[in-house]
Image (cartoon, rainbow, N blue to C red):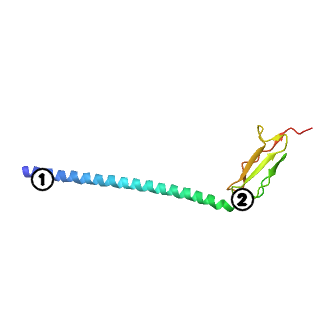
Amino acid sequence: MRTRVRKMQKTFVVIVAAATLALVVVVVVVVVVVVVVVVVVVVVVVVILHIHTISSMLHVGLNCGDPPGLAMGYRIASSSTLFLDTAEYHCGKGYWIRRGQDIQFLTCSADGTWQPELEQCTGNIPN
């Protein structure tokens, strides 16, 4: 009888050890999968950021065309109309854009337009 009990105890210990080992293996596999997913996400984010940077650099030759005209004001002649070039505008005497400002800048943007939208000069027409 004792031998049979001891065999059962040994069998139980083996089963518990095997179950514990299986659980450890499952936990290790889950941790590895999580690490792989995190690494993949980080790589994807880095690639997307690099693509965005490269696409911005590709706009270097983009031409926005002539900047818009400004009624009651004038544009300082800009030497170029390419991506990231700037056009400078001034309002005529007695006119302003907002709260006393009489100067604004537009920049040739990546979508081929001048940004921000040009604000018109306002003020009193001299008598």
Q: Say whether residue 1 is visible.
A: no
Q: Circle 1 — which element?
A: helix
Quadrant of the frame with the C terminus: top right
Q: Quadrant of residue 110?
A: bottom right
| Left or right: 9 in relation to 88 | left
Count of numbered circles on the image: 2
- Please give the residue where the numbered disc 1 appears in the rendered image: 7
Kindly identify the residue that appears in the image at 44 percent across and 56 percent down. Answer: 39
Q: Is residue 76 left or right of residue 44?
A: right
**Label 2 sits on what residue type?**
Leu
Residue 16 is situated, as x and y percent measured from the top left of the image, at 22, 51
Q: Which mark is residue 86?
A: none
Going 85% across and 42% down the picture, which residue do you hit? 93
Where is residue 44 drawn, in percent x and y?
50, 57
Q: Secondary structure at mark 2?
A: loop
27 relative position to 11: left or right: right
Label number found at residue 82: 2
Using the image as rendered, state which of residue 88 and residue 109 is in the foreground. Answer: 88
Q: CA distance from mark 1 to mark 2?
A: 86 Å
Query: Which amino acid does the dot numbered 1 rest on?
Result: Lys
The residue that appears at 40% across and 54% down in the rendered structure is 35
- Classify mark 1: residues with Cα within 10 Å, few (<14), some (14-19) or many (20+): few
